[in-house]
Image (cartoon, grey):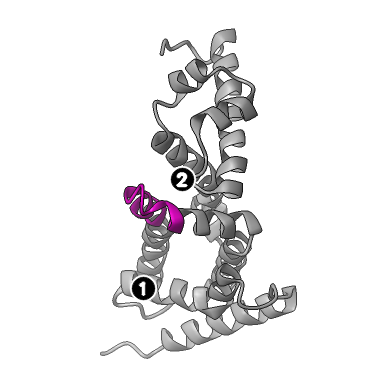
Amino acid sequence: MRTWSEDHPKARLLERKQEAIKVAAKELFLRHGYANTTMEMVAARAGVSIMTLYRHFRGKDVLFQAVIQHLCSQKAKEGKDMFWQGNPAEVLHRLGQLRLAYALNPEEIALYQVILGAMEHFPEVGRMYYHLSVEKALDRLSAYFQELDRQESLHIPDPRLSAQAFLTLLQGQIIERARLGAGPAPTNEEIEHHIDTCVTFFLAAHHANRPN
């Protein structure tokens, strides 16, 4: 497909078409699942020809990856410098609010369920989702913990392991219940209490005295 400069009218038109296609695909994938969504359905929903659809996305797997990347892009705000300012309790609480708000969003829950169903036909999607949803968060949180240890704000000798532990604490049963439909959605009070408990537990575990 021909490329244009960003300010060219054609480039803006292509961008709008791509966005319309991804929005249509997202709605269909979340409603019908990966296997039951066809490229013809996406083209009809987006209001484009099947040839136009294939010019933008050469196959359903590529389109599904684009939808996942689009939905996971909300987590990019975790990397903003301002996000990590403040004392550790404030930062971790803010992180907890962001990740739980994302994970408990009905759209994200639906995406997770669709990905589980899609893995039979498209195994790579699980690794891709894990990279976007978990590994990137681990990388940034590990770097933050490494800096806290360097500053001696907290004792975190293994930043990567501690990052894994904190994200696992946040995950808890609260997210699994939502993903499996095993109970009512948690209230705001329950979510805040869960985050406070995770932060308190984590900080207590990492305030240990350093060896001489």
Residue at image mark 2 = 35
Q: Position of residue 211 (x, y in %)?
A: 27, 89
Q: Position of residue 9 (x, y in %)?
A: 59, 9
Q: Are marks 2 and 1 in contact (CB under 8 Å)?
A: no
Which portion, as a residue range, is magenta?
116-130
Q: Element at badge 1?
A: helix
Which residue is at 58% across, 60% downward? 109
Q: Position of residue 179 (x, y in %)?
A: 56, 68
**Amino acid type shown at disc 1:** Asp
Position of 100 with respect to 135 (left or right) is: right
Q: Nearer the viewer, residue 206 or 165?
A: 165
Q: Badge 2: few (under 14), some or many (20 or more) residues near its Cα, within 10 Å?
A: some
Find residue 177 and report its image quarter: bottom right
**Amino acid type shown at disc 2:** Ala
Q: Nearer the viewer, residue 129 or 64?
A: 64
Q: CA distance from mark 2 to mark 1?
A: 47 Å
Judge whether residue 80 can be spotted in this image: no
Pick whichever of labels 2 and 1 is earlier in the sequence.
2
Does 10 lie within the magenta span?
no
Q: Position of residue 147 (x, y in %)?
A: 38, 65
Which residue is at 74% across, 78% downward? 189
Residue at image mark 1 = 149
Pick the quarter of the image with the N terminus.
top left
Find residue 185 and report its image quarter: bottom right
Position of 66 with respect to 194 (left or right) is: left
